[in-house]
Image (cartoon, helix red, strand yellow):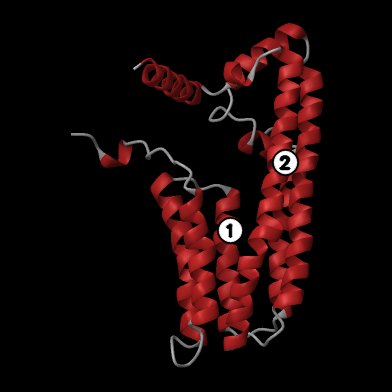
């Protein structure tokens, strides 16, 4: 019998549509449509609405044992939003909180560049995405390690700027949309509206910036090593890619 405690956690597979539904759409609908006294009431709607992203985040952390800084900070952010509403603090604190969370991440990215473990390595240049050992071997052989490290540092600076953008936009949106006293039905409705609006105005642009940074990093790797993307994909991703390619060719042949 295998000891459950010694088993490795299941592989985490991204589920963007589930994330969007649980973290954005369901909470927003509850806050905007069910905060009236004839439904859940402002307090219960806030508790239930925020329980979805909070519960989903905790589930992901426990299920996949991904106790990373950004995930934990996201849970803290949801908890603080609930605290501001339930304690009926001034709505201005929401804008400060919304700006502070990405600002803390951005500062952490900058600080990490002075340590042995820059966050950009953890998030973009890591063995789960790229065959780092293979890349490093060629960089060393070509004497390009220094140039690549400089480009990695530049990518870290770009990365921190995406969080600066998010911090500023979060503050502006919170100030613009959430103007009612916390603990009221209007506050909940505005909070739900802000959550919905933040996706196209903040999350999608930030995602595009992240893709651009990864492309910059990938172009640097290609220029310094001569490898194609297929050459340096992480082994498990390369195996999946080869499997799909063979399935496609088999289907065409049939």
Q: Which residue is mark 2?
A: 112
Q: Is residue 145 left or right of residue 28?
A: right
Q: Looking at the image, which residue is at 71% across and 51% down?
A: 205
Q: Position of residue 34 (x, y in %)?
A: 48, 82
The image's mark for residue 198 is: none
Q: Quadrant of residue 211?
A: top right
Indicate the secondary structure of the residue bearing disc 2: helix
Badge 2, how many Cα within 10 Å: few under 14, some, many 20+? Answer: some
Q: Residue at x 37, y 17 (%)?
A: 250
Residue 166, placed above or below residue 124: below
Q: In the picture, which quadrant includes the C terminus?
A: top left
SS type, badge 1: helix
Q: Quadrant of the N terminus?
A: top left
Between residue 26 and residue 154, name the one nearer to us.
26
Q: Which residue is mark 1?
A: 74
- Is residue 181 visible in this depiction of the protein? yes
Mark 1 crowdedness (10 Å alpha carbons): few <14, some 14-19, many ≥20? some
Q: Earlier in the sequence, mark 1 or mark 2?
A: 1
Establish if 210 lies above or below 107. above
Residue visible at 58% across and 19% down in the picture: 230
Position of 127 relative to 200 (above/below): above
Q: Is residue 70 left or right of residue 239?
A: right
Between marks 1 and 2, how big is the CA–CA gap? 19 Å
Residue 241 % position (x, y): 48, 23
Q: Residue 82 in the image: state x and y as whole percent.
A: 56, 75
């Amino acid at each position: 019998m295998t000891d459950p405690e010694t088993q490795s956690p299941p592989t985490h597979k991204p589920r963007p549509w589930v994330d969007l539904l649980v973290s954005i759409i369901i909470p927003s609908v509850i806050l905007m449509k069910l905060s009236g006294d004839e439904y859940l009431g402002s307090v219960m709607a806030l508790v239930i609405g925020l329980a979805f992203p909070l519960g989903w985040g905790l589930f992901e952390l426990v299920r996949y044992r991904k106790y990373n800084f950004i995930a934990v900070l996201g849970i803290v952010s949801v908890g603080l939003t609930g605290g501001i509403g339930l304690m009926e603090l001034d709505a201005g604190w929401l804008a400060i909180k919304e700006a502070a969370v990405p600002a803390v991440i951005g500062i952490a990215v900058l600080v990490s560049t002075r340590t042995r473990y820059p966050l950009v390595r953890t998030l973009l240049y890591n063995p789960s995405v790229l065959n780092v050992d293979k890349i490093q071997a060629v960089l060393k052989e070509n004497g390009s390690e220094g140039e690549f490290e400089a480009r990695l540092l530049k990518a870290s600076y770009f990365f921190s700027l995406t969080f600066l953008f998010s911090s500023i936009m979060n503050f502006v949106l919170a100030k613009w949309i959430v103007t009612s006293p916390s603990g009221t039905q209007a506050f909940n409705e505005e909070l739900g509206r802000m959550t919905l609006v933040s996706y196209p105005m903040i999350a999608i642009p930030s995602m595009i910036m992240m893709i651009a940074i990864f492309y910059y990093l990938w172009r640097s790797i290609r220029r310094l090593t001569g490898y194609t993307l297929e050459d340096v994909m992480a082994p498990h991703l390369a195996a999946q890619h080869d499997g799909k390619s063979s399935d496609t060719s088999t289907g065409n042949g049939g």
